[in-house]
Amino acid sequence: MPKYYFDRLEYLDILIRKRSTGSPEQLAKKLNISKRTVFEYIDILRSLGANINYSRVKESYYYLVDGNFSFQFNVSDSSPPAKAAV
């Protein structure tokens, strides 16, 4: 998958945590994607364990439980140093 895919999911996660997604139409514009793709991305986050609801009053998606995603490779402190390829 291209990097921009994960960048969008990460940005979506930030907007949801801030409760500033706006309506699905507004969110589609913020992410430069279609409204249908917004729903697909929300479904992806849900399939990864996120409890996401939408508030019609605040016009924003939000998490029912505090949390966040990290869409990058993180090296653990316990891993041995890599040997250089020769």
Image (cartoon, rainbow, N blue to C red):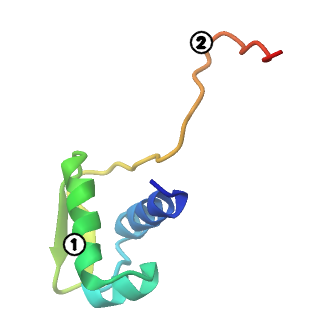
Relative to 53, residue 49 above or below = above
x and y, in percent, of residue 71 in the image: 47, 47
**Residue type, label 2:** Ser
Relative to 86, residue 12 above or below = below
Look at the image and tell me in which quarter the C terminus lies. top right
Label ID, residue 78? 2
Residue at image position (44%, 78%) is 31
Q: Of the two numbered discs 2 and 1 on the same chain, state the one appearing first in sequence.
A: 1
**Residue type, label 1:** Phe
Query: Toward which corner of the image does residue 19 lie, by quadrant?
Result: bottom left
| 10 Å crowding of disc 2: few (<14), some (14-19), many (20+) | few
Q: Indicate which label's residue lies in the foreground, 2 or 1.
A: 1
Q: Which residue is mark 1?
A: 39
C-alpha span from label 2 to label 1: 38 Å
Residue at image position (41%, 69%) is 18
Query: Toward which corner of the image does residue 53 lie, by quadrant?
Result: bottom left
Residue at image position (59%, 12%) is 78
Q: Nearer the viewer, residue 60 or 76?
A: 76
Residue at image position (62%, 18%) is 77
